[in-house]
Amino acid sequence: MATQAGQVAPAVSTLRMRPSRSRAWRKTIMPWLFVAPLLFLNVVVILGPSIGSGFYAFTQWSGLGPAKWVGLANFDRMIHDRVFRMAFTNNVRWTLIFLTVPISMGLLGSALLAPVRRGAMFYRTAYFLPYVIASVVNVQIWRQILHPIMGIGPLLASKGLTFMNVAFLGNRHTVLYAIAFVDNWHWWGFLVVLYLAAMQAIDFELYEAARLEGANRWQEWRFVTLPGILPTLVFTILMTVIWSFLVFDYIYLLTQGGPAHASEVLATEVFNSAFFRFEVGYAAAIGLSMSFIAALVVTGFLMLRRRGWEV
Amino acid sequence: MTALSGKRSGRNVSLVPNYIILTALVLFSLLPLTLLISNSLKSDAEVGSNPLGLPKTGIHWQNYPEAWRDAKFSVTMRNSIILTSGTISGVLVIAGLAAYSLAKMNLPGADILTLYLVVGTSMPAQLFMVPLFFMWTKLGLTDSLFGVIIIFWATQSPFATFLLRSYMMAIPKDFEDAARVDGASELQVLRHVIAPITWPGFLTVGLVVGLGAWNEFLFAVTFLHREEVKPISTSLYAFMSRYGREWGKTSAAAAIMMLPVVILFLMLQRRFIEGLTQGGLRG
């Protein structure tokens, strides 16, 4: 590309400008002009305000007037704050749930669906569908199913399963798990499709070889499929950790962190601190801590990549 | 997958257990969605006596016009359409230009830019949202659809750029070079040569970005407070809280938000799935 264009460009450019300037223009300035809108928006909307958070995290600020420098006070308060601790613990619980339940369901679903031919498309579509539907809509559905009077709990209780008569979203012992259940309902099918796509790239000859050696279905999955989809699996594990510390929609929509902070997470705490209590500096400090966790995972991801993993 | 299953079927292992479990999982996925539609067709009286079953006392279509009126869909639908189409068109231009630069113009420093974008897209919204809110307030961009569209441009473009770049890299250089020899500028090459060939990529990106804008909740609830600018997502949330027990009407409202997405997804599911499964950190 460079050589051919280079042959043409000088002839044109001598009419207007010196060739040397035209070369820099074509090789450096033009390409950067093409990414300039992307970069400009990114700096204004994401990088600039992120640096802002890095500053406000060390101040006391209500959002109006000047911010007051308070050093590490926000972080000190954070560590000793009961609500922050509950929120952080809930994020850890959330991470553990999402590292196990949806990933297992995704692996199971994809393993069962891979050998199926008839109806494969239907199953794939059905599993994926909840993933494209808005959180607000999904929440409306599950609010009805989990309703303490008209929902599935009382219905099962009337059929003899009395232990199911629980206000799943109103009870502080069940609320986090109930929300995780709803979020997982819309999420696991996405993983099935992701793992299926990864399986398609596996060489069939490996399966044939495994069969010739008398491998059963489990061994085939364990020694051919699993190594084949490992990069995708690792990718989903890393993303799960990042996203589990950012979860907001389903919690805010179903309980706003209640009852009595039992389902509070870091993202809802940032939201409440900044926009209901107007403790912007404190909110920034929590936001900064959340990014620290994300940054750790991204670093791990980039290191794996550098080692030649196709994650 | 067909080739794979072809090989496997030679094995004569029964697939019946597979079908049983797969079907159970389909019920898990789809029954809740059926419940929403079924409840949207019940009268209030029937919801009370029969909250989880199919409608038995007749189909109550009136919930839909009532929900449309009471949830002010004439306003919120317009807002959501503006938000979605504004986001799609902006992202396609911004990401199209950037992807072309990365794929076809040998951008010096491309590695650093890619790294910056990968790290940037995995940072939580909570890191930049709060200062951004106060900055946007000063600039008069809160309570404005355009203000949120700009945010979506910034948050969605990196992913769109990576996806479009992979489409553009698959186009042989001869195509652009021929146009360049004819004296076309880079912008003309992008518009008249590359974009027309890579339209499936643009369509895929448009669908994914549009879906994101249509469903988005966090930025909408933070930046749009006045009733006149609320999109469907946040106004539906308020509507559901206000009409709590009137499941017929609230379900109908939720179904109105869901149906365009479901129909589009069923029509173009290959593109949706391709775009959504290539998102995330893949740079």
Image: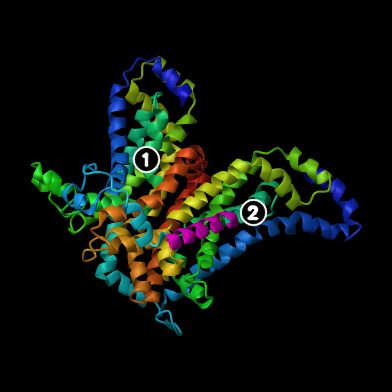
Q: Real-space Cα distance between discs 2 and 1?
A: 32 Å
Say whether residue B224 is visible. Answer: no
Q: Say what secondary structure mark 2 lies in.
A: helix
Taking the image as shown, residue B248 lies to the left or right of residue A45, namely: left
Which residue is painted at 27% across and 71% down in the image? Answer: A81
Main SS class of the magenta portion in the image: helix
Amino acid beneath label 1: Gly
Queried whether the magenta region covers residue B79, the answer comes back as yes
**Image quadrant where residue A83 sits:** bottom left
Q: For the magenta stretch, what is the residue range?
A: B74-90
Q: Name the residue nearer the viewer: A209 or B88.
A: B88
Determine which of the numbered discs, if any, sits on residue A189 in the image: 1
Protein chain holding label 1? A
Taking the image as shown, residue A135 lies to the left or right of residue A300, namely: left
Say whether residue B12 is visible. Answer: yes
Q: Position of residue A286 (x, y in %)?
A: 37, 68
Which residue is painted at 66% across and 53% down in the image? Answer: B97
**Image quadrant where residue B235 sits:** bottom left
- Which quadrant, please, contains the N terminus of chain A? top right
Give the total of numbered labels.
2
Q: Name the residue nearer the viewer: B177 or A149.
A: A149
Would you call the spot at circle 1 few (<14 residues within 10 Å), some (14-19), or many (20 or more)?
A: many
Would you call the spot at circle 2 few (<14 residues within 10 Å), some (14-19), or many (20 or more)?
A: many
Protein chain holding label 2? B
Taking the image as shown, residue B238 lies to the left or right of residue A206, namely: left
Which residue is painted at 31% across and 45% down in the image? Answer: B37
- Residue B188 in the image: above or below residue B145: above
Q: Which residue is mark 2?
A: B98
Q: Say what secondary structure mark 1 lies in.
A: helix
Amino acid beneath label 2: Ala
